[in-house]
Amino acid sequence: MIVRQFLQWVRHAPPGERAEATSALARAYLHSDLSADDLAAAEGAMIMLLDDPSPLVRRALADVFASAQKAPPVVVQALAADQPDVSVPLLSRSPLLLDDDLVDLIATGHPEAQLAIAGRPLLSRSLAAAIAEVGTAEACLTLLENADAEIALFSIDRIVERFGDVASIRENLTARDDLPMTTRQALLSKLSQTLAGFARPWLGSEYADHAAREACERATVALAADTPYEEVAELMRHLRESGQLTAGMILRGLLSGNLVLFEEALAELSDLPLDRVTGYIHDKNISGFHALYRKAGLPDAAYPAFREAIAAMRDGILLGEHGGVARLKRRMVERVLARCAGERGPETANLLALLRRFAVEAAREEARLFCDDLVAGHRVSDDDRLVA
């Protein structure tokens, strides 16, 4: 009887009043002790209200049913597919919406719908994957910020691939303690591409790309220095698959004293077991290393630098060096440059230019470290005087 009167009244009431009455009806459906007939009538009335021309009325239903386990499923399903002003409360938290329904809404819905789903509590891995695949940058950021979301690594990699150039996403990911080194390197690569894009208008395309590539290689070698031993092979595989495992980057790692990176890189490129690779590298007979170098597909023009770097390491040139294996070692670079300069020829011009850039970089880094130590020592001395 009450529902019949409601239906007669609602046809002529203004939108605001209809919305208030609809909200009251929905709350009565959930919380009042209605008979089975009254429940069926109330559900029918609310299904009819799904066609109300005013979004205020439909939003009133969505607000009441947003978290309700006992809401009419057909009403929830219809409202979830409504315009964003109506659907967002349900998309963000309704327990009646199944993953299959939400995946479909992610693919076909508005950006606001994707955003609402990305922030859902206890978000499943499949929903996270759908958002990573087709969601907007804002939705992906919301997903990453959702502490309740279960996000697979391949979904994070997909977000990096699509939006690694977005600063807010990049900052969120780099702040994570559990991010694999391969993903961190992919972020570095995205950043270098972004910087190159900014620099092209005034530096020129070729120079900007070159500078960005070297910056990425420098950061990658530093990253490899912090990579756990058991993850270095995976990092090299990632670099190879992404086309970044170049002779220049490998030489930078070797001239930084990172023998693990060098060995794993050659093992990856040559498809030989690591123990055989290390045997060739440490064998005093250089012909074995030369064969390994060629099997790895590295350029002949760069071979003298690798040969001289290995010889320098055998002579103990790195003994007493500080700073770990994250930066170029000045004595190492200068020795290799001097030896390679004696083989000057058309095919070594690019190699010598690279080594000269390495030498400048190593000298500047050494000077910076020296000055830092000098200032630190001065501060310690001042502190001692104050204590005294």
Image: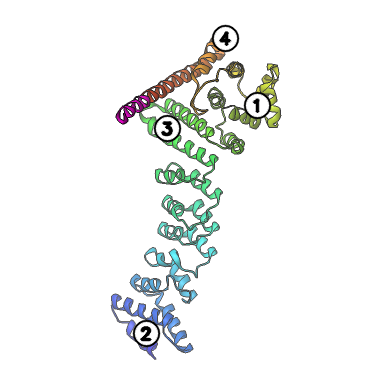
The nearer-to-camera label among 2 and 4 is: 4
Q: Earlier in the sequence, mark 3 or mark 4?
A: 3
Q: Amino acid at mark 1?
A: Ala
Judged from the image, the secondary structure of the residue bearing numbered disc 4 is: loop
381 inside magenta stretch:
yes
Give the overall secondary structure of the magenta segment.
helix
The residue closer to the viewer here, 365 or 146, is: 365
Which residue carries the number 4 mark? 343
Q: Amino acid at mark 4?
A: Glu
The residue closer to the viewer here, 67 or 362, is: 362
Q: CA distance from mark 3 to mark 4?
A: 34 Å
Which residue carries the number 3 mark? 196
Q: Earlier in the sequence, mark 2 or mark 3?
A: 2
Location of residue 68 in the rendering, given as x and y in whole percent from the top left corner: 45, 73
Task: Looking at this view, name the residue that lies furthest to the bottom.
Answer: 1
Which residue is depicted at the point 67% across and 22% down?
A: 282
Q: Which mark is residue 296?
A: 1
Q: CA distance from mark 2 to mark 3?
A: 64 Å
Location of residue 110 in the rendering, given as x and y in whole percent from the top left corner: 42, 59
The nearer-to-camera label among 3 and 4 is: 4
Q: Is residue 323 above or below residue 134?
A: above
Which residue is depicted at the point 47% across and 27% down?
A: 214
